[in-house]
Image (cartoon, helix red, strand yellow):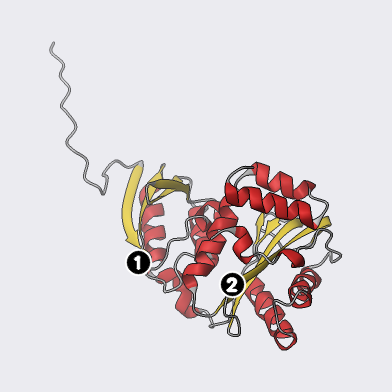
Amino acid sequence: MKLLKFVARESIIVDLRAIAKEQAIREMVGSLHETGRLASNDVESVITAILGREELGSTGIGMGVAVPHSRHPTLQRLVGTVALSRRGVEFAALDGEPVDIFFLLVSPQNQPGDHLRALENISRHLKDERFVSSLRQARSQEKVIEVLEKADQGTL
Amino acid sequence: MVAFLRPRPNEPTMSHDPTVARRQVEITNPLGLHMRPANKFVEVALKYQSEIRVHYNGSEYNGKSILELTSLAAECGSRLELEARGPDATAAIDALAGLVNAQFHEEHEAETSGK
């Protein structure tokens, strides 16, 4: 499942203000709401669900990357966002390092296949140094979208 | 003095070579090998000295890398081959196969909307 099939372009953040886990998640979920991808009523419960998942084990998988995610009963379709942090966020990552690249994912309750495929796609690209370093160098939403497009096309 | 080498018999899939162990497993978690079970797998794999590889769909993945395991995306019903190479290979395979067969203990966790 291509990245731009589920990443909501307008919600992409290139300069995350938060430096702590909860605030970072609030900011990303807030962005999905502001760009019409999540209903107001669902914002708090999505944040709670994502934080709950983090309690089971940080999605900060190391090397400055995190993939916070949750399923949510009100979603019909997978939605995600990308956020970059210039300052680094304290995320209890597996290697203890701050996180500067986030892929946040919210999935419908009963589509495990889509959820896995999105996660697979994100992970596969994150294994590619050019993808990660291109994201780190992006200073605008357009630039991030360009990186995602190239990754989807295999032309990075 | 005549020295001769006896040819090695064909190795069965469950290798008797103490430094290599392999086992086929099936993912039976309804949600497949998503991040949390992948994480548990890595946690167990890291306890062993042996190199751990997971073979799936013609590709090979490093069993000690969370990023590699999450890029596997094995759905429920997928068959994987686990391979360990090293002094504790058999123990590693036993532990890892045990974890997979126990559905990564997912039923013990409260059903949250996050996974």
Q: Are the two marked residues, 1 and 2, in contact with CB atoms closer than 8 angstroms?
A: no
- Disc 1 vs disc 2: which is toward the camera? 2
Q: Position of residue A85 (x, y in %)?
A: 81, 58
On screen, residue A58 above or below A135: below
Q: Residue at x 71, y 51 (%)?
A: A146
**Where A136 falls versus A110 (above or below)?**
above
Q: Which quadrant holds residue B27? A: bottom left
Q: Quadrant of residue A156?
A: top right
Q: Amino acid at mark 1?
A: Gly
Q: Residue at x 32, y 53 (%)?
A: B23
Image quarter (top left, top right, bottom left or bottom right) of the N terminus of chain B: top left
Q: Which residue is mark 1?
A: B77
Secondary element type, mark 2: loop
According to the image, label 2 marks what residue?
A78
Same chain shared by disc 1 and disc 2: no
Q: Position of residue A40 (x, y in %)?
A: 75, 86
Along the viewing direction, whichever of A145 and A110 lies nearer the viewer: A145
Residue positioned most to the left: B2
| Category of crowding for the residue at label 1, using alpha-carbon neighbours closer than 10 angstroms: few (below 14), some (14–19), many (at least 20) | few
Is residue A63 visible in the rendered image? The answer is no
Can I make out residue A133 in this image? yes
x, y (%) of residue B107? 45, 79
